[in-house]
DNA sequence: AACATTGTCCCCCTTTTATGGTATTGTAAT
DNA sequence: ATTACAATACCATAAAAGGGGGACAATGTT
């Protein structure tokens, strides 16, 4: 008996690993309610590929050649805003995760995710959720807590160190800071060294960028 | 037969709604592997309360009197870093969600969550995950995508100049930028000079600070 | 055709930063 | 009383950045 395709969730898979691609295909194609409309081993002309088959959900390997799954996500999302893209990957590095999310991915599953969970996750995105592997979810959550922790982080700096950092953020040189604070430039040097130590950076730009990005001030 | 308490997940509930408090208690207390060690209808002296019973997981109503669940989370997290706190609430507003996450909540469940899902979620936090209701997860994800809207000011810089500025913002030195862009360090110097000209600054820190403060990127 | 812009590269010279130390004083905490 | 931290200051050396200049090919614009 032929199931009405209209009701199926149309899925496209992007993964250069044949084995994974096949097992995903096997899993999804024979699950009622799902339909794998296409799968690709690379993301060349990714927009064209998506246009051809207009899937509802895309499973995207984060390491797909020739560019990367993240680039592909940007490309796809630019042209097809309503598609939901689930990143599918072995990577658990924070950078990759946040880049993918910024690019517009809706979910983020590790490749070790059990089949049943994958099926659930696809249903979840269609229902408006954002499935994530537990460890990913934790990283995402931590992103927020870190932010507030870091606001207090400026407190690891002493008053004087904070004065100096503020000087840097205003674009001042050691000399200018020294004059403004009416202390020796040698003392400024000392503070700068301590600041770098505490902030785990080793240049003025890094310190400024970190302080501003993490909103230590203002 | 008495189950060894050592193996149970110790849970404390903070919720001023008696009905919910009771049903949660009923649900969890009679589920093997769980143990509701205490529940409270307010969060006065919340740290003391937690200290008394040392739970592994706390279910926290976001609206608990007299202050709020978010304040309570901050308080608890300050003293007990290892407790996992799941916010339990009817609210779906973004503000509340992000505030709670920043305060250090690990999970965020809507009160309409089915009992089985609640139990799963508690197991999930203990296992290092971050359970969220689907709609919450989506909001959290959206937080990231929204962020990457580019500004206009940076358009006074050429593509290459922007590449170099981005490098500066990442705290890179001339040398590192040169390597990343695969061009000579002398070329970087040229761009830097042009950037300073256009931005009316004369040091890396000034450029970085200006770009970040005025949100030229991201 | 002439001009402006962009991307690329090179030189010289000066100033500033980065990194590694050491040292003194006052104050707060144990 | 001893320890710990904060604020201050100095020295030496190497690495990096800043400021001035010039150059040339490829595009794009007028």
Image: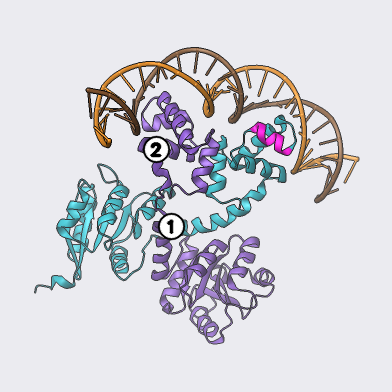
Chain colours: A cyan, B purple, C brown, D orange
Q: Position of residue A208 (x, y in %)?
A: 56, 42
User: Which residue is the site of mark 1?
Assistant: A135
Give, as a single range, the part of the protein colored magenta.
A174-181
| Residue at x 59% of width, y 67% of height | B73
Please state the total of marks drawn on the protein image: 2
| Residue at x 63% of width, y 44% of height | A166
In the displayed structure, D19 sits above or below D8; it is above
Asked if residue A154 can be seen in this view, the reply is: yes
Asked if residue A111 can be seen in this view, the reply is: no
Q: Quadrant of the rendered structure where residue A2 is? A: bottom left
Q: Nearest the camera: B213 or A31?
A: B213
Number of residues whose C-alpha sits closer than 10 Å to that of mark 2, classed few (under 14), some (14–19) or many (20 or more): some
User: Which residue is the site of mark 2?
Assistant: B163
Q: Nearest the camera: D13 or B39?
A: D13
Element on which disc 1 rests: helix
Q: Would residue A178 be counted in the magenta stretch?
A: yes
In the displayed structure, A26 sits above or below A188; it is below
Inter-mark Cα distance, 1 to 2: 33 Å
The chain carrying label 1 is A
Q: Position of residue B168 (x, y in %)?
A: 48, 37
Q: Which disc number belongs to residue A10?
A: none
Q: Quadrant of the rendered structure where residue B159 is? A: top left
The mark closer to the camera, 1 or 2, is 2
Q: Position of residue B59 (x, y in %)?
A: 54, 73
Q: Nearest the camera: B199 or B58?
A: B199
């Amino acid at each position: 008996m032929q199931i009405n395709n209209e009701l199926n969730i149309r899925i496209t898979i992007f993964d250069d690993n044949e084995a994974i691609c096949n097992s995903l295909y096997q899993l999804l194609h024979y699950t009622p309610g799902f339909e794998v409309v296409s799968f690709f081993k690379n993301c060349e002309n990714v927009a064209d590929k998506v246009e051809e088959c207009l899937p509802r959900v895309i499973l995207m390997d984060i390491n797909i050649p020739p560019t990367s799954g993240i680039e592909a996500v940007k490309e796809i999302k630019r042209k097809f805003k309503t598609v939901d893209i689930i990143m599918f990957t072995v990577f658990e590095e924070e950078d990759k995760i946040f880049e993918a999310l910024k690019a517009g991915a809706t979910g983020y599953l590790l490749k070790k995710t059990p089949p049943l969970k994958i099926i659930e996750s696809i249903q979840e995105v269609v229902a408006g959720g954002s499935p994530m592997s537990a460890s990913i979810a934790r990283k995402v959550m931590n992103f927020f807590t870190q932010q507030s922790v870091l606001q207090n982080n400026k407190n690891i700096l002493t008053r004087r160190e904070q004065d100096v950092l503020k000087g840097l953020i205003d674009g001042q040189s050691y000399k200018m800071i020294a004059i403004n604070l009416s202390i020796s430039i040698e003392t400024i040097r000392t503070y700068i060294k301590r600041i770098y130590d505490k902030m785990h950076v080793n240049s003025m730009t890094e310190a400024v960028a970190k302080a501003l990005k993490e909103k230590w001030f203002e």
